[in-house]
Image: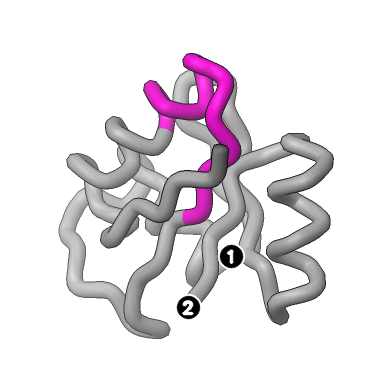
Amino acid sequence: MIVLVRGVGDVGSAVAHRLFQEGYAVVIHDDPRPTTSRRGMAFTDAVFDGRATLDGLCALLAEDVETMRRLVIEREAVAVYV
């Protein structure tokens, strides 16, 4: 099952992290310039830097739908799509 989480802030990141741990494939969606003040404590950095790690789990920015699909299928990381 694929779950779409809206928002790369601290709440969305915590939800995505838990869902991934429970075995779900996770895509986080947000605006290209998310408004968050908690960089370094959420998957927000993936939007700006292409990658973020939160408590040992990696989130990768999917530049296109095909990359997002690959990340979801392979479950190598949480996919971040803007």
Mark found first going from the N terminus, 2 or 1: 1
Q: Is residue 71 left or right of residue 27?
A: right
Query: Which residue is situated farthest in the top direction here?
Result: 22
Q: Residue furthest front?
A: 1
Name the amino acid, label 2.
Answer: Val
x then y, percent, for residue 22: 48, 15
Q: Position of residue 48 (x, y in %)?
A: 50, 71
Instruction: Please report the residue visible at 56 percent of the width from the left and 38 percent of the height from the top.
Output: 1
Label 1 crowd bin: few (<14), some (14–19), many (20+), radius 10 Å: few
Q: Is residue 23 magenta?
A: yes
- Which quadrant of the structure image shows residue 11? top left
Residue located at (17% from left, 58% from top): 37
Give above or below for 45 relative to 31: above
Question: Quick check: is 33 in the magenta stretch?
Answer: no
Circle 2 packing at 10 Å, graded few (<14), some (14-19), many (20+), is some
| Count of numbered circles in the view | 2
Residue highlighted by disc 1: 49
- What residue is at 54 percent from the left and 30 percent from the top? 24
Q: Secondary structure at mark 2?
A: loop
In what element is the residue under mark 1?
A: helix
- Residue 82 - label: 2
Asked whether 41 or 23 is in front, the reply is 23
What residue is at 58 percent from the left and 44 percent from the top?
A: 78
Residue 53 is situated, as x and y percent measured from the top left of the image, at 55, 36
37 left or right, relative to 22 = left
Amino acid tagged 1: Asp
Residue 3 image label:
none
Q: Which residues are magenta?
A: 17-27
Measured from the top left, where is residue 40 in percent x and y? Answer: 37, 44
